[in-house]
Image (spheres, grey):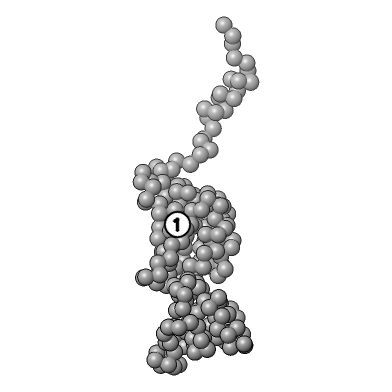
């Protein structure tokens, strides 16, 4: 019979009398250390629905779906796929839309759907071709960021009029029937349609 070495006996005694290194979750709440990367929490007021977080998410835990009929963008966040890398927080254009919390163990669930969150944002849609431009909150954020320079764009003026109603709806809402014309530039158009209008006016 082989007897244990003194070193092995010492390690066994140290292990027996040393307190556990791991936490007692879920019996007791887990208190993470500073800088711990847990579940990303979204601030709806500062989230613009601009797709930046979805574009930089490595596991594609954040996806977007645009519905032109309802005029809404649905943002789906699957925290079951999230690897808590912090890319969404780092690249958020407002710097406040998403922040990593200290929660990670608390999102454990038996049903994967319990870890999926949804969010909706109102879309800005081209009135000529029906293409999605962006969300209204995203464009509004760019207006504030640019300041007076934003009003050099016809698109920005059209959106401002839609919000403030500087002109009547009959004066600004022009139905596109037989191709884009000069008057159509007073509608909300995507960059491609607006370029077509401007090119026609120059010829």
The residue shown at (46%, 66%) is 43
User: Dot 1: few (<14), some (14–19), or many (≥20) neighbours within 10 Å?
Assistant: many
* Residue 125 as seen in the image, left or right of residue 86: left
Q: Residue 186 location in percent, x, y?
A: 49, 87
- Residue at point 37%, 70% (across, down): 69
Q: Is residue 157 visible?
A: no
Where's the C terminus, which quadrant? Answer: bottom right
Q: Quadrant of the N terminus?
A: top right
For residue 51, say whether it is visible: yes
Q: Secondary structure at mark 1?
A: strand
> Residue at the location (47% across, 88% down)?
161
Q: Return the residue at label 1.
A: 77
Can you say whether 178 is above or below 60 in the image? below
Residue 52 spot, x, y in % from top left? 55, 64
Tell me the residue at 53%/83% (across/down): 155
The front one of 142 and 201 is 201
**Residue 125 lies in what quarter of the image?**
bottom left
Give the image quarter of residue 196: bottom right
Name the foreground residue: 163 vs 5.
Answer: 163
């Amino acid at each position: 019979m082989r007897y244990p070495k003194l070193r092995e006996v010492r390690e066994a005694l140290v292990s027996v009398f040393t307190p556990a290194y791991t936490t007692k979750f879920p019996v007791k709440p887990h208190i993470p250390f500073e800088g711990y990367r847990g579940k990303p929490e979204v601030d709806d007021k500062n989230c613009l629905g601009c797709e930046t977080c979805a574009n930089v998410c490595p596991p594609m835990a954040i996806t977007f779906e645009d519905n032109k009929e309802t005029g809404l963008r649905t943002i789906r966040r699957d925290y079951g796929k999230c690897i808590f890398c912090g890319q969404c927080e780092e690249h958020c254009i407002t710097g406040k839309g998403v922040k990593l919390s200290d929660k990670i163990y608390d999102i454990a669930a038996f049903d994967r759907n319990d870890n999926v969150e949804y969010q909706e944002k109102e879309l800005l849609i081209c009135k000529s071709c029906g293409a999605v431009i962006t969300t209204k909150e995203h464009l509004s954020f760019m207006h504030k960021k640019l300041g007076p320079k934003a009003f050099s764009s016809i698109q920005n003026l059209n959106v401002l009029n839609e919000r403030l109603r500087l002109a009547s709806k009959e004066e600004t809402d022009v139905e596109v029937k037989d191709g884009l014309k000069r008057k159509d530039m007073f509608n909300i158009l995507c960059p491609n349609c607006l370029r077509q209008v401007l090119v026609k006016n120059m010829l």
